């Protein structure tokens, strides 16, 4: 059984009708995340000298955006499980400024990366009541990310002519992310809830493949071989009336 299948089985179990769970009803909601990304562990010591693999670059971390559909199932008192499906985009930019050793041309190029993931979280949460209508919710767990499509402009900005193959061959298709959240939850009229929180996350998988096929590890891609994302930001969630 692969990792994707295991996550889908857990997801299906949590979303089953609540037979025997009359006192533990599911709640469903929608949410949006806005977060600052940081691409960590970019190799700044080893350079090949081609494909912009040079020490003369600056890294610009970009904002990311996620849209989510969620389901929660209480387990015992304030303890419960949360899962769902979402789509998120992670972005980075690298700016290269240097003189090319072979052509002696001045290089002023920007390498833009955009990675679009399907996200399937599995979180354990605890709800601390602070009044009849409000509470503080703390959650944490694993966020499984499946790469839907990558986009970058690397082939357009390199001087060398080399066949890099398909773009999806350069990036890791499955990522595991550790995620934590602390939120303020408020009950609106008719039982609906709104939630505003702070989120932090850390990938434990690299964005590029460790052993890429053909030329997919060419140039600066090799400097990204051990890189992974971290993030922090805000989340806004709306849960429908039970």
Image (tube, rainbow, N blue to C red):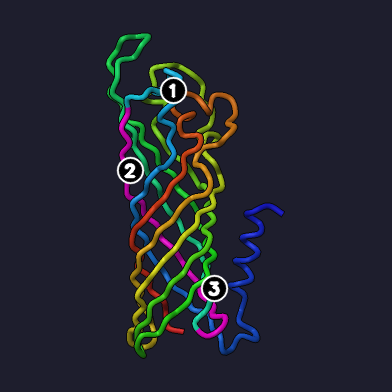
Point out the tag, 3 or 1, that comes first from the N-terminus. Answer: 1
Along the viewing direction, whichever of 10 and 242 lies nearer the viewer: 10
Along the viewing direction, whichever of 152 and 203 lies nearer the viewer: 203
Is residue 67 on the magenta stretch? Answer: yes
Q: Are marks 1 and 2 in contact (CB under 8 Å)?
A: no
Image disc number at residue 166: none
Image disc number at residue 61: 2
Q: Where does label 3 land, which residue?
A: 81
**Magenta region: which residues?**
57-77
Point out the tag, 1 or 2, that comes first from the N-terminus. Answer: 1
Q: Measured from the top left, where is residue 68 in percent x and y?
A: 44, 63
For the point 37% across and 72% down, the residue is: 183
Q: Is residue 40 above or below residue 76?
A: above
Distance (Cα) linking label 1 and label 2:
21 Å
- Compared across the picture, whether 4 is left or right of 147 comes to right
Give residue 122's quadrant in the image.
bottom right
Q: Is mark 3 on a helix, strand or loop?
A: strand
- Compared across the picture, whether 16 is left or right of 88 comes to right
Is residue 206 on the magenta stretch? Answer: no
Image quarter (top left, top right, bottom left or bottom right) of the N terminus: bottom right
Along the viewing direction, whichever of 54 and 216 lies nearer the viewer: 54
Q: Measured from the top left, where is residue 226 in percent x and y?
A: 50, 37
């Amino acid at each position: 059984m692969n990792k994707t299948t295991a996550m889908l089985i857990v997801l299906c179990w949590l979303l089953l009708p609540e037979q025997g769970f009359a006192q533990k009803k599911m709640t469903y909601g929608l949410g949006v995340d806005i977060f600052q990304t940081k691409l960590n562990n970019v190799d700044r010591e080893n350079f090949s000298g081609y494909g912009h693999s040079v020490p003369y670059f600056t890294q610009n971390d970009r904002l990311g955006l996620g849209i989510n559909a969620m389901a929660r199932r209480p387990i015992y008192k304030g303890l419960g499980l949360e899962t769902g499906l979402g789509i998120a985009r992670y972005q980075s930019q690298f700016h290269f400024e240097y003189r090319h050793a072979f052509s002696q041309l001045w290089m002023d190029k920007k390498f833009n990366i955009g990675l679009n993931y399907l996200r399937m979280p599995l979180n354990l949460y605890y709800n601390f009541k602070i009044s009849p209508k409000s509470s503080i919710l703390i959650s944490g767990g694993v966020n499984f990310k499946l790469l839907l499509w990558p986009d970058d402009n690397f082939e357009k900005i390199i001087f060398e002519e080399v066949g890099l193959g398909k773009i999806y061959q350069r990036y890791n298709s499955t990522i595991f992310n550790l995620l934590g959240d602390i939120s303020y939850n408020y009950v609106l009229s008719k039982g609906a809830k709104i939630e505003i929180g702070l989120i932090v996350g850390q990938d434990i998988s690299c964005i590029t493949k460790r052993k890429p096929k053909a030329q997919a590890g060419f140039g600066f891609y090799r400097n990204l071989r051990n890189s992974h994302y971290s993030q922090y930001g805000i989340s806004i969630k709306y849960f429908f009336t039970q």
